[in-house]
Image (tube, rainbow, N blue to C red):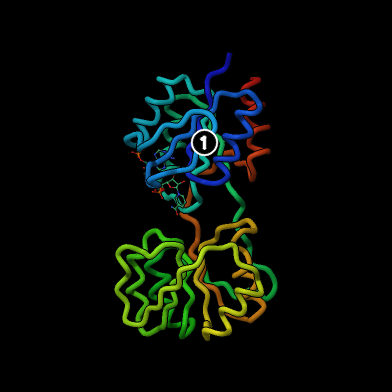
Amino acid sequence: MAGPVLILGGTAEARRLAEQGTVAGYRMITSLAGRTAAPGPLPGEVRTGGFGGPAGLAAYLRQMGIAVLVDATHPYAARMGANAAAAARAAGVPLLRLDRPAWDPGPGDRWHAFPDRESLMQALPTLGRHALVTLGGADLTALPLARGIRITLRAIDPPDPLPDHPDLTLLLARGPFTQAAERALMTERGIDLLVSRNAGGTATRAKIDAARALGLPVAMLERPPRPEVPTAADPGTALRAIADLLRR
Ligand code: NAP
């Protein structure tokens, strides 16, 4: 009998893979970083907390006899991709990445791509006068670098600490939003620049389509680089790849 499948999780896709794998009869273990105080119940087994770098993860893979490692962490989780690749190599365990494909700019899109938050924030005043910043709650420490521009910061929960910026309005709202609602928001508030991560998928796409429809530029924070590994775009494809690996 093959060993368990370890999912490095913390995303909706990881949860769906754990569900589908459990239904298919595989022993699925989901690993969570432990950032969320009360994560919802997950099917299969759950372990929580960092491994202590790639060496710690490799030791865990060996100790648990993991048959397949799936890196299903968030596209903006900067470290785990490299850790997973190094650990899988060291332990001789096949690695699969589960990743929603990034959006590509299409006709009418006016995207400006930035590799990091600092360069993005510094460039904002050259791109507009009132930015709608939608970067998720994590890591807003670079926001004060956006000098001389109004900021409307949209978040689900109030950021703690609130970034120190002289012209900041906090807008608490939870999506999904329709394109019509995003257009209305941008028009009514006089937004002339959208700041976004490249989330991919449809759940947060409306703001990008609204910016295109209004002819607004988008300052796009690029995904952090990850090692090239076999990648599945959705949980169903990942499960088929896992089945193939376990048959070998
Ligand atoms: P990160 O920068 O890639 O990882 C930082 C450290 O956290 C890693 O070195 C590792 O510690 C630990 N870690 C990360 N993911 C883990 C996992 N699934 N299981 C066990 N340990 C993990 O990641 P992050 O941006 O801090 O994100 C942490 C978690 O939140 C991830 O699971 C990610 O999927 C989820 N998440 C992140 C974002 C985001 O915007 N970054 C958004 C939604 C969800 P050790 O080196 O000690 O193993």
Can you say which quadrant of the picture contains the N terminus? top right
Q: Decide: is 25 above or below 145.
A: above
Name the residue nearer the viewer: 199 or 125.
Answer: 199
Q: Quadrant of residue 103?
A: bottom right
Closer-to-camera residue (157/241): 157
The residue that mark 1 highlights is 42
Residue 209 lies, in percent from the top left, at: 65, 71
User: Label 1 crowding class (10 Å Cα cut-off): few <14, some 14-19, many 20+?
Assistant: some
Identify the residue at horizontal 39%, vertical 58% (top origin). 138
Q: Which residue lies furthest to the right in this view?
A: 107
Residue 37 picture location, percent across and down: 38, 46
Residue 216 x/y as whole percent:
59, 80
Q: Which residue is drawn at 56% across and 36% down?
A: 96
Q: What residue type is labelled 1?
A: Leu
Q: Is the CB–ligand 1 distance for label 1 below 8 Å?
A: no
Give the tally of numbered discs. 1
Q: Where ligand 1 lies, by quadrant?
A: top left
Vertical comparison of 178 with 102: above or below: below
Q: Is mark 1 on a helix, strand or loop?
A: loop
Which of the 4 image quarters holds residue 165? bottom left
Q: Where is residue 19 in the image (x, y as percent from the top left)?
A: 60, 34
Q: Please report the residue visible at 63 percent of the width from the left and 40 percent of the height from the top.
A: 235
